[in-house]
Amino acid sequence: MIDLLIDRRTLPKGINFKAAGYETGQEIDVTISRFVTEYHAEVLEDSQGHRFTATFPEALKRPVQIGNSIKAHSVYMSQLQLVPVDRVRDHFADQMGVPVSSGSTCNFNLQSYNRLARFEDCAKQQLIASHVMHADETGIYTGGKRHWLHNVSSRSYTLLYPHEKRGREAMDMFGDIRSFQSVLCHDHWKPYYLYDCLRSLCNAHHLRELERAFEQDQQQWAKAMQTCLLDINAAVDDSGGVLNVEDAKRWRAHYGKLLADAEHEWPPPPPPLNKRGRVKRSKARNLLERLVNYEADVLRFVTEERVPFPNNQGENDLRMTKVQQKISDCSRSMDGAKTFCRIRS
């Protein structure tokens, strides 16, 4: 605290003044410096020359080593702020005069990965117990090969994990997702439908696909359906997160009428004359059939208060991993990808 006194020479002359308190102003700053804690372990020696030395702290394994604060700061910079390891090394050398090699930064990340194993188990249990769980996946490159980064999350927990594959084999790596019984929010990636739980399809995806169908395929029904979904979402928000039975019934009827009109505007292709199997559909037709067949999953947000309109959380949780890929190009190994994912979780 610094006291600032008025220069009495600036005051009007011939007037008496009395103390009336003070006003405050604060300047917030930070000092970057290093400090060294040196331990002196007492040594005692008996008449026979036997020496007895005090025990060093368990964490002190070497005569000189890096402290936990530097390790945590290094992990934060490389894994949370996505600073390349060489630049992390430069930061400690330039700002603090501490020699931290690129290899040490990788070792610090590995230590964090190992210590977070219990967190990962806890996160799985909490996610399985949640009312709504979000799921999504995106492509990543590991060792120059295309792999997949999977994500499951709730309002409080996010769990990321990499895998060589995209489908059920990778999703089963999560383990207890097979026992999840509440609402799983996702896009229309078919392997998610292999699990026995309720669904909520991402309507942000539907809005984008409807926009494409209107602009590229000139589908008038698509524009009407886009407006319908946005109006339903606005009505849900205005009602505090859920519609009453009558309003929900009215909106579902409007939704169904638009799809019935769409069937006339964009009917299914005629069956082939000399071929078996399903006739190939256009993207707009596939979207129309999805909105018809999965109406309950599209509109689940209408009557379930905690179910959102889009799957934005699942997508947002993956967004920074795309930034990491742009910065680092790819992870050098699957072990590196696993380390990144667990720490980001």
Image (spheres, grey):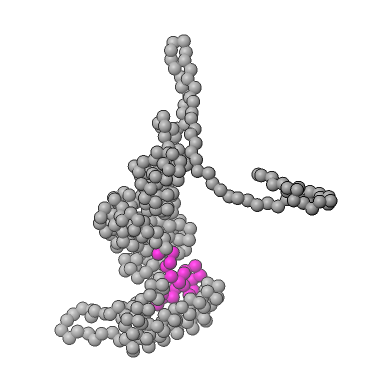
Looking at the picture, how far across and down is residue 101, in whole percent? 36, 41
Q: Please say whether residue 135 is visible from this viewpoint.
A: no
Q: Residue at x 33, y 68 (%)?
A: 189
Judge whether 171 appears above or below 214 on screen: above
Query: In the figure, 209 relative to 154: above or below?
Result: below
- Quarter of the image with the N terminus in it: top right
- In the picture as drawn, the residue positioned furthest to the top comes out as 47
Q: Residue at x 48, y 28 (%)?
A: 39
The answer to which of 213 and 124 lies nearer the viewer is 213
Question: Quarter of the image holding residue 290?
Answer: bottom left
**Quadrant housing the C terminus:** bottom left
The residue drawn where x is 60% and y is 50% is 27
Horizontal relation, residue 19 to residue 201: left or right = right
Judged left or right of residue 302, residue 338 is left
Please say whether residue 154 is visible from this viewpoint: yes
Front-most of residues 182 and 50: 50
Q: Position of residue 297 (x, y in %)?
A: 40, 73
Residue 306 spot, x, y in % from top left: 49, 67
Q: Nearer the viewer, residue 271 or 237?
A: 237
- Range of magenta residues: 293-315
Which residue occupies the foreground of this view, 205 or 328?
A: 328
The residue shown at (83%, 52%) is 15
Measured as percent of width and height from the top left, residue 327 is found at: 35, 56
Quadrant of the rendered image containing residue 218: bottom left
Residue 278 falls within the magenta-colored stretch? no
Counting the numbered discs, the total is: 0
Image-quadrant location for residue 224: bottom left
Task: Please state if 81 lies on the left or on the right of 7 as rendered.
Answer: left
